[in-house]
Amino acid sequence: MVTASHEAQVLVRRAARALGRSGLAHAYGHCSSRLDAAHFLVCAARPMGLIAPGEDGIVVPVDGPLPEGVLGEVRIHQQIYRRRPDVGGVARSMPAKAMSLSTLRLTPRARHGTGSYFAPCAPLWDDPQLIRTEEQAAGVAATLAGNRAVVMRGNGVVTAGASLEEAVVFTWYLEDAARVELDVLASGGAGSEALFSAEEAKLRAVGSGRIYERMWEYLTHGDPE
């Protein structure tokens, strides 16, 4: 039986609390970190911002039924890890502005730096229902495809990164991009857009210069672990 190390448990708890304390998730949401090709660690089935030091998550198989005590939507994580060997972390959250934008069947476009990571725009899973079946979870993962995030209409977002730290950072980036998108729409300026070209987005959406590490430090500052 595979067990998670102390370091893996601490990482998942810190990530969960970062999402909760930053207003990117409320009572609902979950995050996970890949342990090996066949297993990942998901946070405790509690509001992420309330997960306490020492409150361990649960090891979940990439293939197979969900263990007892694991939330049904963790099937999304399973489906992503099956399809994406490059993914080391997944975050499921409820960022407010991305949620509002999604009800218009819109997702953030590459208008500024953090938006460039999802260029030309994050894909939309156009179904507002909770993800409670294998078929739904597979659909969300297929919609994500090779992207960093997928937005679910009226139902939050899922991000995927090479690590859980990256997945958390991408959640913040996506919400920031949604903020800008809504501001542009509210200003009436959507008809005179200056969007990143594919080449501009490729050049801007980098991880060098401690880009991800600095945002991770910002989001986890003051964490009890």
Image (cartoon, helix red, strand yellow):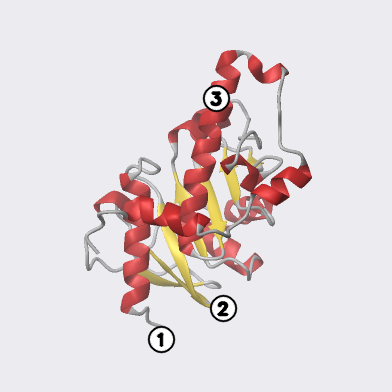
Q: According to the image, label 1 marks what residue?
A: 1
In front: label 1 or label 2: 2
Q: Which amino acid does label 2 sit on?
A: Ala
Looking at the image, residue 113 lies above or below residue 15: above
In front: label 3 or label 2: 3
Q: Position of residue 99 (x, y in %)?
A: 50, 33
Q: Where is residue 209 in the image (x, y as percent from the top left)?
A: 54, 58
Residue 82, picture quadrant:
bottom right
Question: Residues under labels 1 and 2: Cα distance?
Answer: 14 Å
SS category of the residue bearing label 3: helix
Q: Label 3: few (<14), some or many (≥20) within 10 Å? A: some
Q: According to the image, label 2 marks what residue?
A: 37
Question: Residues under labels 3 and 2: Cα distance?
Answer: 39 Å
Image point (59%, 49%), residue name:
149
- Disc marking residue 83: none
Q: Earlier in the sequence, mark 1 or mark 3?
A: 1
Q: Position of residue 18 (x, y in %)?
A: 35, 52
SS category of the residue bearing label 1: loop
Report the residue that reaches farthest toward the top.
188
Q: Label 1: few (<14), some or many (≥20) within 10 Å? A: few
SS category of the residue bearing label 2: loop
* Nearest to the observer: residue 44 or residue 168: 168
Q: Are marks 1 and 3 in contact (CB under 8 Å)?
A: no
Image point (33%, 57%), residue name:
45
Q: Which amino acid does label 1 sit on?
A: Met
Q: Earlier in the sequence, mark 3 or mark 2?
A: 2
Instruction: Report how many numbered discs are placed on residues in the image.
Output: 3
Image point (48%, 31%), residue name:
97
Q: Are marks 3 and 2 in contact (CB under 8 Å)?
A: no
Q: According to the image, label 3 marks what residue?
A: 182
